[in-house]
Amino acid sequence: MFVSMNWIRDFVDLDGQDIEALIHRFTLSTAEVEGIEYKGRDIENVVVGEILTCEPHPDSDHLHVLTVDGGDAVYDVVCGAPNARAGIKTAFAKVGGRVGQMKIGSAKLRGVVSNGMCCSEKEIGISDDHSGIMELDPSLKNGTDIKDIFPIEDIVFEVDNKSLTNRPDLWGHYGMAREFAALTGQKFKELPVMENDYSGNDEVAVEIKNTDLCFRYTSVRIENITKKESLMQMKIRLYYCGTRAINLLADLTNYLMLELGQPMHAFDGKKIGKIVVDTPNSEFKFTTLDGQERDITTDTLMIYDNETPVAIAGIMGGLDSEITDNTDTLVLESANFDGVSVRKSASRLALRTDASARYEKTLDPEMTLLAVKRFMKLLFDVDKDAKIVSRITDVYVKKYPEVTVDFDKAFIDRYTGIDISVDRIKDTLISLGFETSNNGESFTVKVPSFRATKDVSMKADIVEEITRIYGYDNFEIKTTLSPLLPAKTSLLRKEENMIKDILVKAYAMNEIHTRVWQNPDELRDLGLKVTDNVRILGSAEDQGILRASMMQSFLPVISKNKNYKPSFGIFEIGRCVHGTKEDGTADEVRTLGIALYSKTESEKQLYFKAVELINTLIGQLKHAGVSYKKIETSYEWQHPKNTSEISVDGTKIGVINTVHPTTLLKIAKNASVVMIELLMDELLKIPHHDLQFNEPSKFPGIDYDLSLLINEGVRFENIEDCWKKEKILELKDVSVIDIYDKDSIRSVTLRFRFELDDRTLTSEEVQADIDRILSNLRKVNVELKL
């Protein structure tokens, strides 16, 4: 947002102030200033010149040879402007003068010497109009410096819009001027307005049907408008603040928006009967002022003339009711709309305007009537013949509640660490528009409406107001004397950190952070559909649907990073949403997502690496064993045969799976991907198992290897149960030493470790144990490989 200091001076006396230093104070106290421009300083020795004669150039079909009275002499000038003619007065740059970066000198053009230059508004730097030279008021005295006539010199600074998000009152020069008045201690001047002198009964009919989205609508009808062009002062201010001058009525609405921060719209009064504010019952097409046809949905707030749509509320008017140079009657709109609704509509239509940018910030409804009165004042200053032909219609359906804050000086002193006097506290708040009363050191403050919509609501906000005007740079730097205690770490945080340490230090994995919603474009690239789930309010189509699985975020990440390393692992502790709870809120589930990718390892190798990772993780965290059980798939990217449930002590804590071949082909050829999801809340609820320490036996043990043929459908837990249920005390350990899976033959070689603490086992004792185990194995369809 661009701010003109000339404009600010309309409302606060800044004579004698160091403007650059004041703008710096504004940065420290209010909002970040991104840059300062010094307008008009590059314009020198440009005066009012009267064209006495205008003759065609003897050697050109478009140039003219002029004689120009510059006040002190008559000059010969060559000019190519199409509107150059005898009798008009224009901006004349003398030899030795400066226009922008151009130094004016005497020059020969097509054989004729030109001593000076007649200037356009663009060359002076006060507009983009380069269609011809300026035409000035004939009553102006020749030789008068152009800067004495128009406010060309100005200091304009740009404010970062992001720093104004919570300050809707600062989206206009009037609110900015209040800040400068508070910073300087100068009086803040009242805004000159005009009261309506119409005494009849006519009024603009206004009906607000959707009172949830339109809070206030103020309107008036004005006729017999004869002036079409704005005053040069207004045009210059609009241009310096980034807005193009159009015509008087359009310029006035833009001027008021930049002055008060209140967007306004002027309808052609001959095309408006009754104003109706509502959302449509069905979708339709609507052509806006920019000539574009827009798709209007049923949740877009519209302005109607009875039943005919004439504007998108808070965003842009319609082409059919626009103001033109021939308009002599207007119906003025000054309204307050729901900021969220305007933002959603602007995003949906891809039509963000200066008006919508302000409405999004939750404007003060009290501003609408003031803006109408200010509009009338500015219009009648230019066009004395204009006539107000209606009462001011003011339909006010929703008022924000008044906000009152009580505090005492001790609270301010405690927060700031400094002693700010009672008088200074009171004067500061009053200068910012707060109604303030005090009883000794106790204060009661009524927050002004322009700060109560979303900004100031509690005592801490009042502290900020006082201290920022006092000046943060005026605070004495002190070292605080307070105990420095280590932050307490909860058990949940401790275990999360332990998980991250294991994954990073033991498995060299990379932690990532992904968004909680699904990206439909990225999923479609992998041939996957967006899973229906809870949707973010205001999102369009398939956008903003929250993920139900971490893998909906991980699969695109793997695809994007596949070419950077042949093998890598990623993990994240994030949130997934599994529908909604009974109270209607999202059922958020903290989930640990892990993905392994490799071009060098087979799918089987990577799968067993993932199993080892899970066993290590649970073993380190809970000192417990893990069991796996094949389950049906829940998502299209899960492999139909290699998807298993992960359980600890009978509690399901997650899923491990390889990727469906169709999805894997979309990611990379000749690559393997294994994915793990662990439910963090379920995992952390599992109690820690106590570690048991056994003294190593002094007697030698016996190792016994069995190679077993595994039939289809047999899982390791089925085999494991064959020796566990025998409760063989001397069996200390069972480990897998080899797996064979080829040519329809599947076998596994197990090593059984037998030993006793008090004596050496005999081979007969061990063989008896093995026989019992083999008997049990045959019952589950597992045979000894011979």
Image (spheres, rainbow, N blue to C red):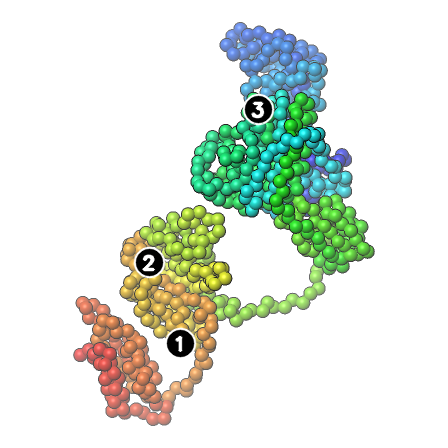
Front position among marks 1 and 3: 3
- Where 159 falls versus 719 (above or below)? above
* Three-letter amino acid code at the position of disc 3: Thr
Q: CA distance from mark 2 to mark 3?
A: 63 Å
Determine the secondary structure under disc 3.
loop
For disc 3, the marked residue is: 327
- In the picture of the structure, the residue carrying the numbered disc 2 is 637
Query: Which of the marked residues, 2 or 3, is nearer the chain's N terminus?
Result: 3
> Element type at marker 2?
loop
Q: From the top left corner, tell me how far across and down residue 58 is, in percent.
A: 53, 6
Q: CA distance from mark 1 to mark 3?
A: 81 Å
For residue 212, say whether it is visible: yes
Q: Residue furthest bottom?
A: 759
Given residues 373 and 638, the one toward you in this image is 373
137 versus 725 height, above or below: above
* Residue in the image at 75% along x and 53% along y: 444
Residue at (32% x, 87% y) in the render: 728
Which of the two labelled residues, at mark 1 and mark 3, occupies the earlier sequence position? 3
Q: Earlier in the sequence, mark 1 or mark 2?
A: 2
Using the rendered image of the protein, determine whether residue 338 is visible from the camera's viewpoint.
no
Q: Amino acid at mark 1?
A: Asp
Residue 636 against residue 783 in the figure, above or below: above
Q: Is residue 362 above or below residue 693?
A: above
